Amino acid sequence: MSAEREASEIFEEFKELTPSEFFRRNKQMLGFSGKIRSLTIVFHELITNSIDAAEEAGILPEMVIDLKRIDKDHYILRHQDNGPGIPEPFITKVFCTMFAGSKFRNIQSRGQQGLGCSGCVLLSQMTTGQPVKIRSGYKEGNKIKGVEMTVKMDVKTNQGLILDRKEIELDSTGVSMELHFKDVSYSLSEQGAFEYIRRTMIANPHAKIVFKDPTGSRYIFDRATDEIPPMPKEVLPHPKGVTADDLIFMAKHTDKRRFRSMLTSSLSRMSNKRVDELEEITGIDFNKRPKDMKWEEAEKIVELFQSMDFMAPPTAGLIPIGQEQVEKGMIEILEPEYVKTITRKPKTYKGGVSFVIEAGLAYGGKSGRVVGEQKKAEIMRFANRVPLTFDQGSCGITEALKSIDWKRYGIRDLENAPITVFVNIVSTHVPYMSTGKQSVAPEAEIMQEVRQATMKIARSLQKYLNAKRAAKEEAMRAKVFETLVPVVLKEAAILAERDVPEYIEVMKKVTRNAGILGGATDDE
Amino acid sequence: MSAEREASEIFEEFKELTPSEFFRRNKQMLGFSGKIRSLTIVFHELITNSIDAAEEAGILPEMVIDLKRIDKDHYILRHQDNGPGIPEPFITKVFCTMFAGSKFRNIQSRGQQGLGCSGCVLLSQMTTGQPVKIRSGYKEGNKIKGVEMTVKMDVKTNQGLILDRKEIELDSTGVSMELHFKDVSYSLSEQGAFEYIRRTMIANPHAKIVFKDPTGSRYIFDRATDEIPPMPKEVLPHPKGVTADDLIFMAKHTDKRRFRSMLTSSLSRMSNKRVDELEEITGIDFNKRPKDMKWEEAEKIVELFQSMDFMAPPTAGLIPIGQEQVEKGMIEILEPEYVKTITRKPKTYKGGVSFVIEAGLAYGGKSGRVVGEQKKAEIMRFANRVPLTFDQGSCGITEALKSIDWKRYGIRDLENAPITVFVNIVSTHVPYMSTGKQSVAPEAEIMQEVRQATMKIARSLQKYLNAKRAAKEEAMRAKVFETLVPVVLKEAAILAERDVPEYIEVMKKVTRNAGILGGATDDE
């Protein structure tokens, strides 16, 4: 053990990293691994940001995306939206500071983590060294202010550096940006950028995307509806959903002067009467300052929350796509033989985080995915209308679907059925498994709802498949009847040495398909 | 569109989060999702930290872990190691600051991300509100300094708060800590904490762990060898492994005054002669200050690196477990009928990050996992000797193993074979897919090496299985011969009306197994 080193020596190399430095070393944690996936993640981040921004401002989302290939794996991406724009002081924060964003509230939105835009800028910079060019048009009073900036991310400080800035005249609000990427690749595969746009359109029939691909082809994904989904409201956390840690955290950062008023103003379904009840049972003085609340007291209160009856959490915060809209989307894209969709009532997981499951089943047509010459089942997972493209294997939604006894619904083998299963989870807080936001944690209540929703519509599909099978058998029976009766009639007439009677009119009355009958008589 | 909101209004809610705040909202990104998994991740973080620290100091790692259950899902975990300890000024950083650590160098180590300890403290605090108690003994000159602290994490600032501190007398160096957890669960399942320790012992035969489980049972996992693995050396990045971004980053933070000297001192295999060559071909002035190097120039240099011949990266940075040690570990834990292991030569991925693949195959005995009454194949994945317990489905190692045509090696169906496949990837930079460090990105070169290594030993397994089958058939043939010959002899003797001749000695000469023969004659 001559090599023994002392702690002081080892800790000479101790460092602290900024979030940007951290992700620069670990870009795969942002989902950037592999050329195809990296580009799809970029599309994902920019498209979700644009749709969120437009909806928040009450605007029908519209994007123009232009992907130009200028060398083997060197692309320029231009992304333009019609959202409310970003006020100048926030531009470098949005694009160059990780863990910064306007989406950290208790509200349903596509983005959630304050990593999206800045992650794309980091990737761009790491692979090409190019700064990002940004144009932002935003309202200030009655005027539209326009600004154009060229910025870089300083990873050492997690801040933006402005290289160039000028004011410009713009007619409308919105953000457009130009980013260079290398070491990425555009693909038409299931995990590629094009399929990502296609799936986005299924779940967002109110959006419009014009996409120019690297070959120069221009695709217009037009909107199927002009209705902007109602804006989800920020909802206060439900008592059954908070932990002692949450209460202590709230107490530390509230501007209320008494614990009592903090409770009624920070939690939903929390009336003064309820607080009185709590106070009586726990014996805690609720008039003390929030900061004086102890952990044990918070724990006692939370425990009591679990045993008290509260109204279910307000669901104003949850805006599902809706049964009809999902159906429209699936018909538009899959042209199926049969489709059935469902939007379930809100449920909660972890005691108080509400969520809604929507499911759809499409059979036949372009449903399923084509592998070689076979049709395989296709699972389309969404979270708050955002397609989840990767990590299917480790996703709670997939797990739930696979746990269904599909044989009971007339599907012998899910893997090899020509069906598309659509599942969308709507929640103010989707429990993602990784920073890449590509899979949902297997929370028991969520899995149960996915199963319930899917089994419900699977029952309808089964009825359809049974009816189809019955109709097919009926048609076969009819066909047998219609081809045999004329023969029997003719043979009988010959045996009886009489003319063949006029039977066509009679047959038409007892069979349903005159066409088949006509065909059959032609064969005489 | 009456609900239209302006940008300024939307951006009122713009926030910046600290890393601790971010992970407090997204603890599943640290792997904390589900009760069993959360506890396993805690064991993982603490055990890898302890082994790393001991090895870095040249000490044989030893841990005493005590998990006490004090209420349904409320546990107290005491974890004590014999490492070099943590100097007092770094204690709050290690336990309470995320993205801080001593492991950000280009060196092979189990931990890599500066999230481990602080992540556990965050989980403890979020579920119980309890501070963490820490004792650290570390050398200062010739004396051992001892300190005991009670600390909390202030998530708003990503810093530690010291609640209590006193100096204590200690005989030896090391760290011990006491953490409370709720909402976790101890399990004996494949993904539970116990199995995690067991697998750790397979890949770390030089470590010792004494574990007291919640039922009070005490397990001593003793070391199988007294050799400390040689300490991996920090290696300079290889020219083929750096990107233009890396060069620019180095140039920004170097203390060298010329680009030339920065290159020779920051990269491996980079001689003055090489730099002259580069200078001549690129026409760039290498005597300029590093900060004056432009992106285009860096790109030109990196491009040139790709076409130049360099010696392979130094592999002093890579310390595999070793073929023999893996075999020892597998025999110790699995008691297999047959085992074969391999440690391959270093390879590189992404052009210059070196890695080594080790693989092992065990057949029979306790190999495979028992599911109901069936034996299924078991895949044990490791990265730098650390068991990867979760996200098996999305891991490049699993993908590579599944892509092998096992039928060619006498295994009809990998899923249902009674085998254990062991794979360890050794690298200074394992490309993890998620913050939970549970799966390896599917880099082509890594997948190829996993396939090659496994197929190589699968060939040996196939030979063993063939020989076993042949031996079985041979034994059956012998058995037939040995049971029939006496009968024929006796019957022939009766027909010939003569005495049965003494055949046993003769038979012993022509058959190999006198025992079987003896048995056969006893049955006359």
Image (spheres, coloured by chain):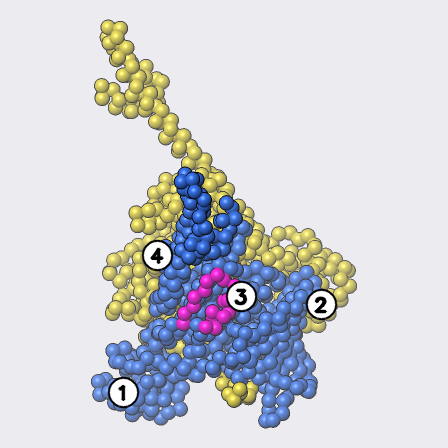
Chain colours: A blue, B yellow
In the picture of the structure, the residue carrying the numbered disc 3 is A333
**Residue bearing mark 2:** B296
Instruction: Please say whether residue A355 is visible from this viewpoint.
Output: yes
Residue segment shown in magenta? A324-343
Where residue A522 appears, x then y in whole percent? Answer: 52, 48
A192 or B284, nearer to the observer: A192
Q: Amino acid at mark 1?
A: Arg
- Residue under mark 2: which chain is it in? B
User: Residue B189 placed where, x, y %?
Assistant: 32, 57
- In percent of the image, x 58 and y 65: which residue is there? A193
Name the N-terminal-most of marks 4 and 3: 3
CB-based contact (under 8 Å), mark 2 and mark 4: no
Q: Secondary structure at mark 1?
A: helix
At 62% from the left and 52% from the top, the residue drawn is B312
Amino acid at pointer 3: Ile
Callouts 1 and 3 in the same chain: yes
Chain bearing tag 1 is A
